[in-house]
Amino acid sequence: FGEVLYKNGYAQNASTARTRYLSTIFAIQDWYCYPLDDPKGTARISIATVRGLHAFARRRSKDLFSDIEGVPLSQFDMAEVLLAFSGFSVAMLQNLCGFRIERDDQRHMIHMWRLVGYHLGIRDEFNVCRSLEFVQACLKDFMAFTPRRAATSRKSFFMLRKTCIEGLSSAIGCGNDFLYASQYIAFTTILPPAES
């Protein structure tokens, strides 16, 4: 997934990264604030725009991987990103920010992300947001493999991380060191450790 973002310009420089990631944040804000059941409404128009950008990036990146490696922005890639926006976000809000989110509210949030995933084109068998319990189980598996994933990441992943942190640190008014430390904390102490 990182290769696709890198090829499509997300890591050109801090300014480009800031613009692109902020546009993602604003799109997500639309999905939270406007009804998802209105095909002509703000949320669905925003989702359609993102889906179109994904299709463009997929076409533009088809030469990145061999047939063995798979399709750029595959259903698996999309599911992993959906997990980050849903399960990881809930865990971060509770464990890092100290918000107490009632179980029913967590279920509603996960259901909202299930609908977003559906409208983005994620097939049901890849949609991790089928239930709160399933999201939590997937997140546990994700965290168990995070050290291996980090150890085997391509160069593009580290370029994306660098430009994202540099771009967003100026946008939110904190230094790069704060965001690097926050990332470390998130992946080492925020989430409950995966069982061996």
Image (cartoon, helix red, strand yellow):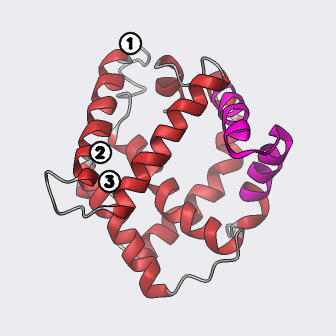
Q: Nearer the viewer, residue 23 or 195?
A: 23
Q: Which of marks 3 and 2 is nearer the N terminus?
A: 2
Q: Do the residues labelled 3 and 1 touch (CB within 8 Å)?
A: no
Asked if 195 appears above or below 147 in the picture, the reply is: below
Q: Distance between the residues labelled 2 and 1?
A: 28 Å
Of badges 3 and 2, nearer the viewer stands 2
Q: x%, y% of residue 12?
A: 60, 17
Q: Magenta span: helix, strand or loop, mainly?
A: helix
Residue 128 in sight from this viewpoint: no
Question: Around disc 3, counting alpha carbons within 10 Å, would you say few (fewer than 14), some (14 to 19), or many (20 or more)?
Answer: some
Secondary structure, mark 3, is: helix
Residue at left offset 37%, top offset 28%: 70
Quadrant placement of the C terminus: bottom right
Residue 194 placement, left or right of 114: right
Q: Nearer the viewer, residue 92 or 75?
A: 92
Kind of residue at badge 1: Asp
Amino acid identity at mark 2: Ser
> Dot 2 corresponds to which residue?
46
Q: Write down the residue under mark 1.
A: 63
Q: Residue furthest right?
A: 177
Q: Which residue is drawn at 73% across and 32% down?
A: 166
Q: Which of marks 2 and 1 is nearer the N terminus?
A: 2
Question: Where is residue 31, by image quadrant?
Answer: bottom left
Q: How far apart are marks 3 and 2 (CA)?
A: 22 Å
Find the magenta span and give its range: 159-186
Q: Where is residue 87 in the image (x, y as percent from the top left)?
A: 51, 65
Residue at image mark 3: 126
Question: Within 10 Å of the Cα at label 2, are there few (<14), some (14-19), or many (20+) other Cα atoms?
Answer: some
Q: Which one is earlier in the sequence, the residue at label 3 or at label 1?
A: 1
